[in-house]
Amino acid sequence: MFIKKYKKMHEESRKKDVVDSYGNLAKVVSQNTCQNRHSKVVSETIGYSKKEIENVPDNSNLGVGCGNPSALAKIVEGETVIDLGSGAGFDAFLVSPKVGVNGKIIGIDLSDDMLSLARKNAKKGNIQNVEFRKGDIEKLPVDNEIANHIISNCVINLSTNKQDVFNEAYRVLKPNGNLSISDVVLIKELPNCIQNSIATHVACLSGAENIDTYIKYVKNAGFKDVTIESRKEFPIELMLADPQIKELFEKADFDIHSEEAKLLASSVVSIALSAKK
């Protein structure tokens, strides 16, 4: 009983650290032009076109993704899309014109500051088919079988209960619904100094799972046709150039020029994964 209680407290503590850190990012990004420039560079590197980047409201692109999940999903007019960990709304806004006025996007995020920023961005861009809800991706605040697509960008790895995330994704998808996600996974084990770092967890690294284990979670949830659409080295140097992430590494006394950083770079890849209910 004690071990189970301790584990739950530890998980809640990690989750709070993640929410607080991304909440702080939401607070500072609108005042930081360097952050905005960095975000555009990162987004082009990981697969977004210049047109996509320019056609969303300012401050919705935070540069903390690892791929372009909306490019995987064959989304059509009138469909419902759920974005797991929607942040400031970047991917949700890209999907908006695809589903049109008869479609809907539901963004789920646990940070009040991120939700506030996303809603301001939607209002600023006059985007009316996007709704942002507060919720945990391990327990989605939506009904069964309401979505045609689920997308997510470099968020599921932050969860300490990834099986719950995929179980929930399966629950809320309609029959024949599609899962399209970008995420980071491990191709070899991280050094202990990195695994134990809150900074790297928030930076989407120490929470990453072995690629085979990750795929197993998806299949265990019931998904079929699970496919790794692409796999490539993750541009960690760009992530570490993010002033927010750099600050976190400095607080954790993690030297980004060390041998540990080189081990980190060789251990992590970004994947694009698709699956069907």
Image: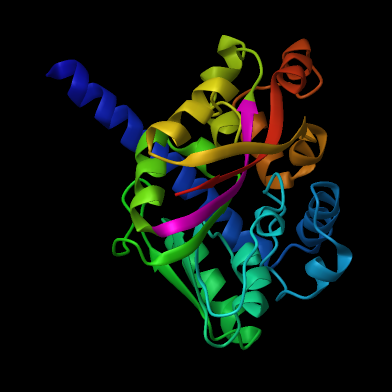
* Location of residue 125 in the rendering, given as x and y in whole percent from the top left corner: 66, 84
94 w.r.t. 237: above or below: below
- Residue at point 79%, 47% (across, down): 46
Main secondary structure of the magenta stretch: strand
Residue 160 visible in the displayed image: no
Side of 256 relative to 121 (left or right) = right
Total marks shown come to 0
Q: Nearer the viewer, residue 269 or 100?
A: 100
* Location of residue 234 in the rendering, given as x and y in whole percent from the top left corner: 76, 33
Residue 62 visible in the displayed image: yes
Q: Which of 273 and 24 is in front in this view?
A: 273
In reply to whether residue 112 is colored magenta, the answer given is no
Q: Which quadrant of the rendered structure holds the N terminus?
A: top left
As drawn, the residue found furthest toward the left would be 1
119 w.r.t. 123: above or below: above
- Residue at point 81%, 21% (across, down): 257
* Location of residue 66 in the rendering, given as x and y in whole percent from the top left corner: 70, 44
Q: Quadrant of residue 189?
A: top right
Q: What stretch is highlighted in magenta?
A: 174-185
* Location of residue 103 in the rendering, given as x and y in whole percent from the top left corner: 52, 80
- Residue at point 42%, 35% (across, down): 162
Q: Which of 107 and 11 is in front in this view?
A: 107
Q: Which colour scheme is used?
A: rainbow
- Residue at point 76%, 22% (across, down): 265
